Image (tube, rainbow, N blue to C red):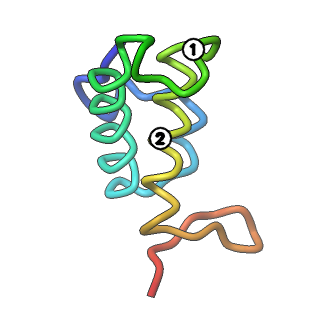
Amino acid sequence: MPYQKNEDLPESVKTHLPQHAQDIYREAFNHAQEEYKDSDKRQDSNDSVEEISHRVAWSAVKKKYVKDADGGWRAKE
């Protein structure tokens, strides 16, 4: 299910990521939902589109943000 706004994101995302990182997560998740809805496009067709979309979204966040030692997220320099 695509997320229309950041308030719709899972609690684990909303409570840990800064606003811009949430934007990245939401956009990547929604794009992956569309891209991988057809199981033929998934490398492992046993994975659900939901699982893949969350992995893609976290990967997109990690390209721009890094997790601090205290567990918070900050933009990469």
- Tell me the number on the disc at residue 67: none
Label 1 vs 2, first from the N-terminus:
1
Q: Position of residue 41 (x, y in %)?
A: 40, 22
Question: In the displayed structure, would residue 53 be above or below residue 48?
Answer: below
Question: In the displayed structure, would residue 28 be above or below residue 5?
Answer: below
Q: Secondary structure at mark 1?
A: loop
Residue found at x 55% / y 30%: 11
| Camera-nearest residue between 2 and 5 | 2
Residue found at x 44% / y 88%: 77
Residue found at x 23% / y 23%: 4
Residue designated by label 2 = 56
Q: Is residue 74 left or right of residue 32?
A: right
Residue designated by label 1 = 45
Residue found at x 61% / y 17%: 47
Q: Quadrant of residue 26?
A: top left
The crowd level at tag 1 (other Cα within 10 Å; few <14, some 14-19, many 20+) is: few
Q: Is residue 68 left or right of residue 37?
A: right
Q: Secondary structure at mark 2?
A: helix
Q: Position of residue 15 (x, y in %)?
A: 55, 43
Q: Is residue 58 left or right of residue 72?
A: left
Of the two numbered discs 1 and 2 in the rendering, the one whose residue sits closer to the viewer: 1
| Camera-nearest residue between 45 and 58 | 45
Q: Quadrant of residue 20?
A: bottom left
Q: Position of residue 68 (x, y in %)?
A: 68, 73
Amino acid type, callout 1: Ser
Question: In the displayed structure, would residue 51 be above or below residue 48?
Answer: below
Question: In the displayed structure, would residue 12 be above or below residue 65?
Answer: above
Which image quarter holds the N terminus?
top left
Amino acid type, callout 2: Val
The crowd level at tag 2 (other Cα within 10 Å; few <14, some 14-19, many 20+) is: some
Assess whether mark 2 and mark 1 are in contact (beta carbons under 8 angstroms): no
